[in-house]
Image (cartoon, rainbow, N blue to C red):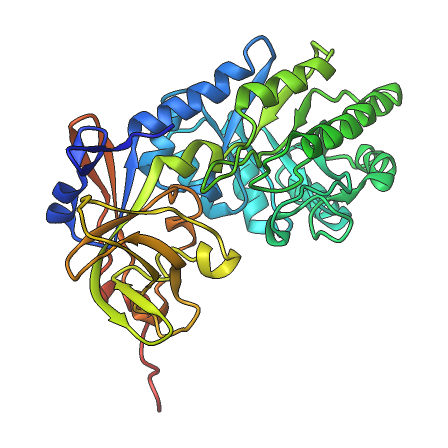
């Protein structure tokens, strides 16, 4: 469910017409719904009621300070994968004691930053990382709280670029090496082992891979406890899918119910890292038609948003519903919706049947609240889009549109001698 709907043939976000936002801020424009973010967080949190748990929103899905602030006010923690994401999360007011740090390439400076902040734990992805963290923590006179990210070799049945739990993945430590890995961690003076982490991929629409992975790592916890490890946290990652087109992903309630049937340990806190499931359908990309062009083979709708604004269709061949902001009685037409980037791969939709459009018309690219702006770039020297948060009948500019000066910020000409 989301709060983008038609009223008298005009699309609204909550109680604000999208046309109003375009008139105020131009396009391309990312628009987020406060009520949808809040509702999706609440549904996920309620699903795990009765189980000790922490929801750590996956910041990489949408790092907007306004989004993070909204979720922080509801009690959310954060899952971060860089020093920049940690900085954003703490600036948004998220308690460092509810932040977990994942990612395969943590730098020394990032480890120091996270230790100084006092995060809940590091999800360790390799033995070299573990040993470096031990040295860094020792130099700071601290103990680093860690879990090992275990790779259960489970096929998540999703796009290969977002599958993270297979033996061929760069992420995590293989399941068969996990016990010896924990033994190595126990021998390090400045490491405090407190948890176990597992994340198998993103946009999962079937519960069976989740449950397969959960049972494997849950059994591993029993083995580790028998060896004397005080495993207090089980981080199950994120990955629960959303509906972009005709997918029917399990609901958070179905996911939680399946986990609860297996979970029998009252001394274990679950950490859950939803990102897309909370933010995906809480945002859209608003864009304006520049031109239409018909050829003998293809009909094109050229808009002012490109792959630099939303790369998912080009990178993953991902589907996003595209809807007219104003419904008309014009005939349907099969078109490619493309952007202004100088690449043949710059498209938002291909062979899409939709209402005939003309210059100046507005369209909404749906389900763009996750991995939309967060993956945007300034390719072709295009300034970044603006972002707006809508709450009821009020709207707030949360990121100004980029400028040409922004494109050159930090650059300088060499001082030749």
Residue 76 visible in image: yes
Left or right of 57? Residue 409 is left
- Where the C terminus falls, by quadrant? bottom left
Residue 263 or residue 416, whichever sits in front: 263
Q: Is residue 257 left or right of residue 7?
A: right
Tell me what residue is drawn at x 69 percent, y 16 percent. 268
Quadrant position of residue 17: top left
36 versus 43 height, above or below: below
Nearer the observer, 270 or 187: 270
Q: Tell which of 244 and 327 is nearer to you.
A: 327
Which percent across, then down, holds residue 160? 64, 53
Residue at image coords 48%, 44%? 60
Q: Report the number of numbered marks.
A: 0
Left or right: residue 71 versus residue 250 is left
Q: Give coordinates of residue 229: x percent, y percent.
A: 81, 23
Residue 92 shows in the view: no
User: In the image, is residue 143 above or below residue 64?
Assistant: above
Viewer-nearest residue: 399 or 208: 208
260 relative to 343, above or below: above
Image side of residue 313 versus residue 105, left or right: left
Q: Quick one: quadrant of the N terminus?
A: top left
Measured as percent of width and height from the top left, residue 199 is found at 65, 37
Q: Position of residue 198 (x, y in %)?
A: 69, 35
User: For the view shown, which residue lies furthest in the bottom direction?
Assistant: 417
Residue depicted at x 46% and y 61%:
314
The residue sitting at the front extreme is 331
């Amino acid at each position: 469910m989301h709060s983008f709907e038609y009223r008298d043939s005009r699309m609204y976000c909550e109680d604000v017409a999208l046309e109003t936002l375009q008139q105020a801020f131009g396009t391309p424009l990312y628009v987020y719904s406060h009520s949808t973010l809040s509702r999706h967080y609440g549904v996920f949190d309620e699903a795990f009621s009765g189980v000790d748990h922490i929801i750590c929103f996956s910041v990489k899905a949408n790092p907007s300070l306004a989004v993070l602030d909204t979720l922080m006010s509801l009690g959310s923690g954060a899952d971060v994968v860089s020093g920049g994401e940690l900085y954003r999360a703490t600036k948004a007011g998220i308690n460092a004691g509810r932040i977990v740090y994942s990612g395969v390439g943590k730098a020394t400076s990032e480890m120091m930053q996270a230790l100084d902040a006092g995060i809940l734990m590091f999800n360790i992805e390799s033995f070299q990382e573990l040993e470096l963290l031990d040295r860094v923590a020792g130099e700071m006179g601290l103990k680093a709280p860690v879990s090992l990210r275990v790779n259960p070799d489970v096929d998540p049945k999703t796009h290969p670029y977002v599958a993270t739990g297979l033996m061929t993945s760069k992420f995590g430590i293989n399941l068969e090496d996990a016990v010896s890995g924990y033994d190595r961690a126990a021998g390090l003076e400045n490491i405090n082992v407190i948890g176990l982490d597992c994340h198998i991929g993103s946009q999962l629409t079937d519960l069976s891979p989740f449950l397969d992975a959960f049972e494997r790592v849950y059994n591993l916890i029993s083995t580790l406890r028998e060896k004397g490890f005080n495993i207090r946290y089980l981080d199950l990652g994120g990955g629960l899918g959303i509906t972009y087109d005709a997918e029917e992903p399990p609901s958070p309630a179905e996911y939680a119910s399946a986990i609860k049937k297996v979970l029998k340990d009252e001394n274990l806190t679950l950490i859950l890292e939803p990102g897309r499931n909370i933010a995906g359908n809480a945002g859209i990309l608003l864009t304006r038609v520049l031109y239409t062009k018909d050829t003998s083979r293809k009909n094109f709708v050229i808009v002012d948003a490109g792959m630099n604004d939303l790369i998912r269709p080009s990178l993953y061949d991902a589907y996003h519903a595209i809807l007219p902001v104003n419904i008309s009685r014009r005939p349907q037409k099969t078109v490619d919706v493309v952007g202004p980037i100088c690449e043949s791969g710059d498209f938002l939709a291909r062979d899409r049947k939709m209402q005939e459009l003309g210059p100046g018309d507005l369209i909404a690219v749906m389900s763009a609240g996750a991995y939309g702006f967060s993956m945007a770039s300034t390719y072709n020297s295009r300034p970044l889009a603006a972002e707006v948060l809508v709450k009821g009948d009020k709207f707030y500019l949360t990121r100004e549109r980029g400028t040409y000066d922004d494109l050159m910020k930090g650059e300088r000409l060499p001082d030749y001698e």
